[in-house]
């Protein structure tokens, strides 16, 4: 245990007058105190103007003495430069999910099971709201927030530390006093309803798509690569579990929450310790009655055996604790009328039928559309235009039609039919299981951004610099309407995009130009043909050798290949029968595309590197490892991950590993990247 120090005595602060250090520490402490009162306790003590004055004074001091600016300072909540990607984080303890129960009888059975396993007839429970947001892990060392991550798969999450720092209700420094040297806390990040509606109003005014619900808004905001976007979103956090800590654990979950509150962490205000299961049921009823008046979305209550030693005795299942459950609320339902059924085309090309409804309020939210999931679901429920239906917010979030309500003497319209052509681009519609999809893919505006991102990805054409934001600008400004348009871009067009200067524009154009020479399997991968991943793309390239042969093949030829069944062959036929897809491929050829096929076994023997084995070690500057591997395989060689006497060549890049030592010991020829590229160039010219 330790206490928060009053000021910094480190050598870097030696030039700063002691009085300024003390004032800076005092300002930090005051601002943290007022943040806690405003964002956590909801009872501010000072006016906004007075708070702004304190904040400006702290900012002025930190600008005057930058060495005193610390990560936990209140001024450091505005966000940091954008990340390339979110890193992975191993959780200190698994972040489990909860078993969900809906009926009171199920909860009573849970109580009986707990009593039976613990050998007692009396159990106390702690009950609290089940927030509808994004679960996060937060780590404090010596009272300072050092890392935060999403739940992920329960064992490994994504590092969102810089985004969590922007949330005002999350203290960057725990309350002065005593706290564990190391504390790992689980909580929920969400958005208050009033803030959610205000955010959607702003999005609408700017012409942007609105969020479907507060949970989506919170999740999307928290996983931004640009933390300045997160900082602009009104997120809040509530903590509800100690995952790990140094020292002695509190004896109960209730005491755990009290300890977190003393540390200055926000905990559920609406919570209760219940001595019997009947009191748990009563809390559930009371909470359901007042949920419409709560400032945030909840979809039930969480019931936990209170004593920690009993929790330890009960233990865990593979995905959930035995000592806790989610006691869900039944979905909210209202009656309304289906005014029309339309088709929505998603980013992956899936066609989803949507019911346009006569607006109806369901649980305080006005619903005017509801998903019908797929054609089979529409047929099963027999939903038609003009029907009277019961609408629910399934999972208390997504509007859906629960059932049709028959109306006597009603003349109904004809059954709903899925379209034969995409309503967005007119391409043919194909079916895969229960789902229909647009075969246009890269030429369909609804799918275009995703198609380009996939085309440029590392496993496809590997166009460095063509990321999500750039793709969005290119499509939104009408510069790219299909994949071939990428190869018509010029420097002047790129310089008009946000974030581009001469060098970045040149680098992107160079990367696009380099991608014109591409192995057949990578192009197949990049085209985004449904069910054609890396493995199937390699199989197709090996079996057919050229794109023309693949495009000319029929179902029988595809299905003669062991790894390809009816669904994959149908997907290939549908893709290449669509004229718009063939037009894009023709345009790529006209723009100078060179598609390197995979040689047959007979032809492979005549290739210059036939029978040779390559091993790569260290970093390559001009190629990715996958690109280098593809190059030598096209020339007949094989690539191995280990060095042996049979190895032909070891290509050593920067910081080579132990493979270089092994090659030298075994007398294997070692070449550098430049020599390797010279060899490749000579073979291509010859």
Image (tube, helix red, strand yellow):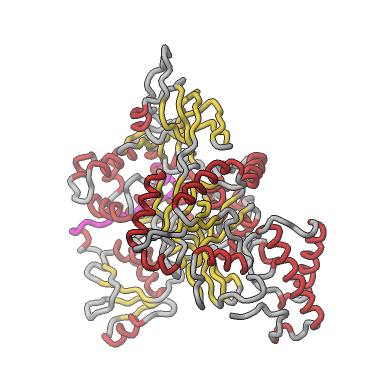
Specify whether residue 129 is in view.
Answer: yes
Q: Quadrant of residue 5?
A: bottom right
Q: Is 601 included in the stretch rendered in magenta?
A: yes
**In the depicted structure, whether residue 364 falls above or below residue 649:** above
Q: Is residue 10 magenta?
A: no
For the point 40% across and 46% down, the residue is: 589
Q: Is residue 431 left or right of residue 372?
A: left
Residue 419 position in % (x across, y down): 39, 27
Q: Residue at x 79, y 65 (%)?
A: 54
Residue 487 located left or right of residue 524: right
Whether residue 109 is situated above or below residue 84 in the rendered picture: above
Query: Looking at the rendering, which quadrant does residue 267 occupy?
Result: bottom right
Q: What residue range appears in magenta?
A: 586-602
Residue extending farthest front: 121
Q: Residue at x 75, y 68 (%)?
A: 30
Q: Position of residue 328 (x, y in %)?
A: 45, 46
Q: Nearer the viewer, residue 121 or 484?
A: 121
Residue 425 visible here: no
- Which of the two residues, 130 or 481, is positioned nearer the viewer here? 130
Q: Quadrant of the N terminus?
A: bottom right
Q: Residue at x 53, y 56 (%)?
A: 509
| Rendered location of residue 557, percent (x, y) | 20, 43
Residue 575 in the image: x percent, y percent?
34, 40
Q: Is residue 581 left or right of residue 188?
A: left
């Amino acid at each position: 245990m330790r206490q928060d120090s009053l000021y910094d005595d480190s050598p870097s602060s030696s030039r700063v007058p002691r009085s300024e250090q003390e004032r800076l520490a005092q300002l930090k402490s005051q601002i943290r105190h007022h943040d806690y009162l405003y964002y956590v306790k909801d009872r501010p003590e000072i006016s906004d103007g007075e708070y702004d004055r304190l904040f400006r004074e702290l900012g002025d001091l930190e600008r005057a003495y930058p060495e005193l600016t610390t990560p936990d300072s209140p001024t450091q909540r505005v966000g940091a430069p954008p990340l390339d990607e979110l890193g992975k984080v191993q959780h200190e303890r698994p972040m489990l999910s909860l078993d969900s129960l809906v009926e009171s009888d199920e909860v009573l059975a849970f109580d009986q099971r707990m009593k039976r396993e613990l050998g007692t007839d009396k159990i106390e429970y702690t009950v609290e709201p089940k927030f509808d947001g994004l679960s996060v892990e937060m780590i404090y060392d010596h009272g300072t927030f050092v890392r935060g991550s999403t739940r992920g798969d329960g064992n490994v999450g994504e590092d969102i530390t810089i985004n969590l720092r922007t949330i005002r209700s999350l203290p960057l420094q725990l309350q002065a006093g005593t706290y564990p040297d190391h504390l790992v806390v689980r909580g929920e990040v969400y958005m208050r309803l009033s803030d959610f509606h205000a955010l959607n109003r702003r999005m609408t005014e700017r012409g942007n798509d609105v969020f479907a619900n507060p949970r989506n808004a919170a999740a999307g905001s928290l996983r931004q690569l640009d933390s300045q976007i997160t900082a602009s979103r009104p997120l809040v956090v509530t903590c509800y579990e100690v995952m790990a800590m140094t020292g002695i654990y509190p004896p109960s979950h209730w005491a755990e929450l009290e300890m977190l509150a003393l540390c200055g962490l926000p905990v559920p205000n609406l919570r209760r310790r219940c001595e019997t299961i009947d009191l748990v049921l009563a809390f559930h009823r009371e909470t359901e009655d007042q949920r419409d008046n709560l400032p945030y979305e909840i979809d039930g209550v969480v019931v936990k055996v209170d004593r920690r030693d009993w929790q330890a005795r009960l233990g865990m299942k593979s995905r959930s604790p035995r000592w806790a459950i989610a006691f869900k609320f039944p979905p909210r339902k209202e009656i309304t009328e289906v005014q029309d059924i339309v088709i929505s085309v998603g980013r992956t090309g899936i066609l989803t039928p949507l019911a346009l409804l006569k607006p109806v309020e369901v649980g305080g939210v006005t619903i005017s559309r509801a998903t019908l999931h797929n054609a089979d679901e529409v047929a099963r429920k027999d939903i038609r235009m003009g029907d009277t239906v019961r609408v629910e917010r399934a999972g208390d979030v997504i509007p859906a039609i629960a059932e049709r309500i028959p109306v006597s003497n009603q003349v109904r319209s004809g059954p709903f039919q899925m379209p034969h052509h995409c309503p967005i681009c007119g391409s043919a519609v194909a079916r895969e299981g229960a789902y229909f999809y647009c075969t246009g893919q890269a030429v369909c505006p609804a799918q275009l951004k995703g198609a380009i991102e996939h085309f440029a990805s590392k496993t496809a054409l590997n166009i460095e610099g063509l990321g999500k934001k750039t793709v969005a600008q290119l499509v939104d400004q009408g510069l790219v309407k299909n994949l071939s348009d990428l190869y018509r871009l010029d420097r002047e067009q790129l310089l008009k995009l946000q974030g581009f200067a001469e060098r970045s524009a040149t680098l992107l154009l160079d990367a696009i130009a380099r991608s014109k020479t591409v192995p057949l399997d990578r192009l197949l991968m990049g085209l985004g043909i449904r069910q054609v991943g890396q493995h199937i793309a390699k199989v197709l390239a090996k079996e057919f050798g050229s794109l023309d042969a693949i495009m000319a093949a029929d179902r029988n030829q595809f299905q003669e290949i062991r790894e390809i069944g009816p669904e994959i062959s149908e997907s290939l036929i549908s893709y290449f029968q669509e004229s718009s897809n063939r037009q894009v491929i023709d345009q790529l050829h006209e723009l100078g595309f060179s598609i390197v096929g995979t040689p047959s076994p007979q032809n492979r023997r005549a290739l210059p590197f036939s029978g040779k084995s390559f091993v790569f070690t260290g970093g390559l500057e001009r190629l990715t490892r996958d690109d280098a591997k593809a190059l030598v395989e096209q020339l007949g060689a094989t690539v191995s991950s280990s060095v042996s006497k049979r190895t032909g060549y070891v290509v050593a890049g920067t910081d080579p590993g132990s493979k270089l030592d092994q090659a030298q010991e075994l007398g294997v020829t070692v070449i550098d990247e430049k020599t390797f590229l010279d060899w490749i160039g000579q073979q291509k010219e010859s």
